[in-house]
């Protein structure tokens, strides 16, 4: 990291609790884009595709953003799911994984006690070659997950798209940054300034300068929580 003072706040990734009107919601980062949201006695995994799942609770719900291997890993899903596990994701994910209930950009659906809104995630300019994008609009979903009035935004793989900048009343945001697939820390910070969540976590940031992201948001009133999503 380029900013040594900010390095003091780079912590391992323990669970963190957030108060809601329905009781505490607990977030546990796992690795890269994978994390666990526990609330109301239920376990919701987001993109369980990387990291160690030994000893973790079985999934009541699984929410998947995209088809790439760092977001969709059937072998890990098989480890954590149980007969009653409900899975939700875009059509592209349902085409690759049986049992996924489809939610498309702009739709709102319930997933147990969680209210889920699918938000677009896509590239504006970056792709493997001219005329192609790493993430086409409409294929994948970001999400706003609401529990007890607390709104959690999960960006998925995206650049700083208008739909992200237009978000309102986000309490906690998880925002990606890594090249060449998504965006730079500075681009991510620009988008975050626009929708102004109370708290933001950089995630899906392998190889990116999270210190630059935090510095770009200094003085905005947004709390930046830099955690080590790659701790062994």
Image (spheres, rainbow, N blue to C red):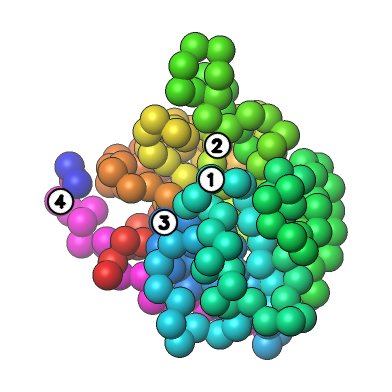
Taking the image as shown, residue 186 lies to the left or right of residue 47, namely left
**Image point (20%, 62%), residue name:** 8
Residue 74 magenta-drawn? no
- Residue 172 drawn above or below residue 78: above
Q: CA distance from mark 1 to mark 3?
A: 13 Å
The residues colored magenta run 3-24
Q: Earlier in the sequence, mark 4 or mark 3?
A: 4
Which image quadrant for residue 97?
Answer: bottom right
Image location of residue 57, percent across then percent down: 56, 85
- Residue 45 drawn above or below residue 43: above
Q: CA distance from mark 2 to mark 1?
A: 13 Å
Q: CA distance from mark 2 to mark 4?
A: 28 Å
Asked which secondary structure carries label 3, the reply is loop
Q: Earlier in the sequence, mark 2 or mark 1?
A: 1
Q: Earlier in the sequence, mark 3 or mark 2?
A: 3
Tell whether label 4 touches label 2 (CB within 8 Å).
no
Which image quadrant for residue 88?
Answer: bottom right
Which of the two discs, 2 and 1, sits closer to the camera? 1
- Residue 117 drawn above or below residue 83: above
Taking the image as shown, residue 214 lies to the left or right of residue 126, namely left
Disc sitting over residue 68 in the figure = 1
Name the residue beneath numbered marker 4. 4
Image location of residue 160, percent across then percent down: 54, 31
Asked which secondary structure carries label 1, the reply is loop
Name the residue beneath numbered marker 2. 158
Q: Earlier in the sequence, mark 2 or mark 4?
A: 4
Asked which secondary structure carries label 2, the reply is loop
Q: Can residue 173 be seen from the camera position used here?
A: no
Q: CA distance from mark 1 to mark 4?
A: 33 Å
């Amino acid at each position: 990291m380029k900013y040594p003072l900010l390095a003091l706040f780079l912590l391992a990734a323990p669970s963190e609790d957030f108060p809601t009107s329905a009781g505490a919601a607990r977030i546990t980062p796992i690795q890269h884009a994978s994390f666990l949201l526990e609330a109301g006695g239920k376990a919701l995994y987001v993109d369980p595709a990387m990291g160690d799942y030994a000893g973790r609770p079985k999934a009541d719900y699984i929410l998947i953003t995209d088809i790439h291997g760092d977001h969709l890993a059937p072998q890990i899903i098989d480890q954590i799911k149980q007969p009653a596990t409900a899975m939700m994701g875009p059509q592209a994910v349902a085409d690759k994984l049986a049992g996924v209930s489809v939610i498309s950009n702009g739709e709102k659906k319930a997933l147990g006690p969680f209210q889920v809104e699918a938000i677009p995630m896509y590239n504006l300019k970056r792709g493997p070659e001219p005329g192609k994008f790493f993430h086409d609009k409409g294929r994948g979903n970001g999400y706003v997950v609401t529990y007890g009035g607390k709104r959690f935004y999960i960006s998925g793989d995206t650049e700083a798209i208008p739909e992200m900048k237009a978000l309102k009343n986000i309490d906690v945001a998880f925002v990606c940054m890594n090249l060449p697939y998504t965006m730079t820390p500075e681009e991510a910070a620009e988008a975050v300034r626009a929708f102004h969540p109370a708290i933001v976590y950089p995630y899906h940031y392998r190889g990116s300068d999270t210190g630059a992201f935090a510095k770009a948001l200094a003085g905005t009133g947004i709390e930046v929580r830099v955690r080590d999503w790659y701790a062994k």
